[in-house]
Image: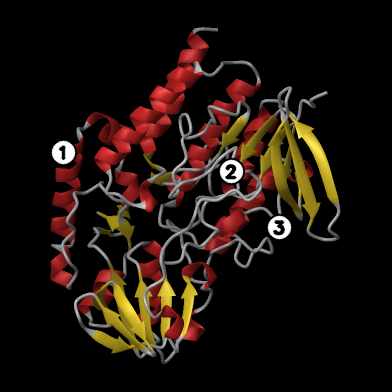
Amino acid sequence: MIMQRVCVIGAGSSGIAAAQVLQARGIEFTCFETGSQVGGNWRYDNDNGMSSAYRSLHINTSRQQMEFASFPMPADLPDYPNHAQIAAYFDSFADHFGLREHIRFQTEVTSVRPLPDGGYQVDTRSTVDGTEHSETFRAVLVANGHHWDPRWPEPAFPGAETFTGAQLHAHHYRTPDILTGKRVLVLGFGNSACDIAVESSRIADRTLLAFRRGEYVLPKYFFGRPTDTLSSPFVTRTLPMFARRWLLGAFLRLKLGKMSDYGLPEPEHKLFAAHPTVSEDLLSRLGHGDIQIRPTIARFDGDTVHFTDGASEPVDVVVYCTGYRITFPFLGEDIVKPVDNHIDLYRRIASVDHPGLYFIGLVQPLGAIMPLAEAQSAWVADLLDGTTTLPAPESMRRSITDYNRAQRKRYIASKRHTIQVDFHPYMHELKQDRRAAARHR
C-alpha cells in the first residue's frame, strides 16, 4: 500500500520552501537532508559537503527580491546580506514554521524508484552510522540544488596535466589565503569569477581574468537603489524585449559607459541573451589596472599558460569558474537523464513520464530563486491536494517544445542557459495556472 506522505529531497532554500508550503496546506511530508542543518548552498562549510559558498560571499540579488513571501527578511539586514546572514534567515524560517521536526538530518537519499502501482520507493542512508532504510511515498519533490557538482573544462585544456601550479574549481574556493603573493588566473566571467578575481587583485602579485566571450556587467545599484528592485512585473511582462533592451542599455551607458572603456571586449550578444554578471567592484579594479583581461586558455606548458591570442604568461594558481553540472545521483538514467544540463519538464517542474515526480528550484532566473521555489511549491501543492490536475501528456510535451524553442531563440547556446527563466513572467505563468484551476473548481 502506498503511503500518503510526500518526500522532499534537500533542506536548502528550495527544500524548506517546499516544506513550508506543504505544511501550510496540511500535506504530510518528510524532508531528507544529507547535512545537519538547513541552508544548503548558503551554509558556509556545510557538513553535507555540497556548499560552494566562499567566506566573502554576498548575495547578488537584493534581500527585497530574495525573501520568501511567507516570511520577509528582517528590515535591518543590508541590501545585499552575506552568506552567514542568509543562513541565519533560513534558520529563522525553519524555526518560525516548525519545520525541523519534519526534516531527517544527516540522511542521504541514495535511490528513488517508481513503483508499479504508483508512488515511489525512496532509499536512504544515515551519514552517521550508515544505517539504510526504505520507505514509500506518493510523490517526490526534488530540491537538491544545481550548484554543487562542479563542472571542469570539458575536455580539459591540452597540457593541463603538465601544469606545475595549483588548479581548483570555484566550488572548492573558500578563502583568499591561497592566492596571496601568487600569479593567479581566474577562468570565467560569471559572478563567482568576478568576485574571486576582485578578491585576488587585492592580495595576489598578478591577477588575470580569462574568458571566451564578452558579457554585460551590471552594477548592484542604480540611482541609489538595488538594481533588481527597478524591475517590475509591468516592465518585464508589458514592455517588448527590444524596449527592455533599449532601456537597460541606456541606463548602462549613462552609468558605466561601454564595456570596452574598461578593456573588456564588447559583448557580441544582445542584452538579456545571456545571464548578466553582477559586480560593483570589477570595473573599478580593471580601471586601476589590478586585473588584466585575457582570452580563454589554449594550452598549458609547465608553469606557463598559453592563450588563444598567442600570448603566454607564467601562472601559479588557476581557478576554474566554469559552472556546475545538473545531476541527480539518486535517480536512474531511465527516470531522468540531463544532457548538457538540459531536462524536459512541464513548467520547469513536473516530469511528464513519471507522475508525482517534481523538481523545485531547478531554474536559473534573472532574479532570485527563493520566491520562485515558493511559488513552484504552491503549484505542486495544488496537484497534491486535488485542487487541480495536470494537462494531458501530449499538451505538456507541446508546452515543453515551445519553451525549448523560445530558449534557443532568446539565449546564446550555453549549458548555463538551459534552465533560464525571467522572474516576473515565470511567476505570472505559475499564478495564471493556479487561477485558471480555481475558476474551474
In percent of width and height, residue 102 lies at 76, 41
Which residue does the numbered mark 2 point to in the structure image? 333
* Badge 3 or badge 2: first in the primary sequence: 3
Residue that appears at 53% across and 48% down: 73
Q: 206 or 342, which is in the foreground?
A: 342
Residue 35 got which mark?
3
Residue type highlighted by circle 3: Gly
Residue 242 got which mark?
1
Q: Nearer the viewer, mark 2 or mark 1?
A: 2
Q: How is the image coloured?
A: secondary structure
Disc 1 crowd, CA 10 A, few/some/many (<14, 14-19, 20+): few
The alpha-carbon separation of the residues under discs 2 and 1 comes to 40 Å
In percent of width and height, residue 56 lies at 48, 71
Helix, strand or loop at disc 2? loop
Residue that appears at 20% across and 40% down: 244
Quadrant of residue 237 in the image? top left
- Please indicate, yes or no, whether residue 120 appears anywhere in the rendered image: yes
The alpha-carbon separation of the residues under discs 3 and 1 comes to 45 Å
Helix, strand or loop at disc 1? helix
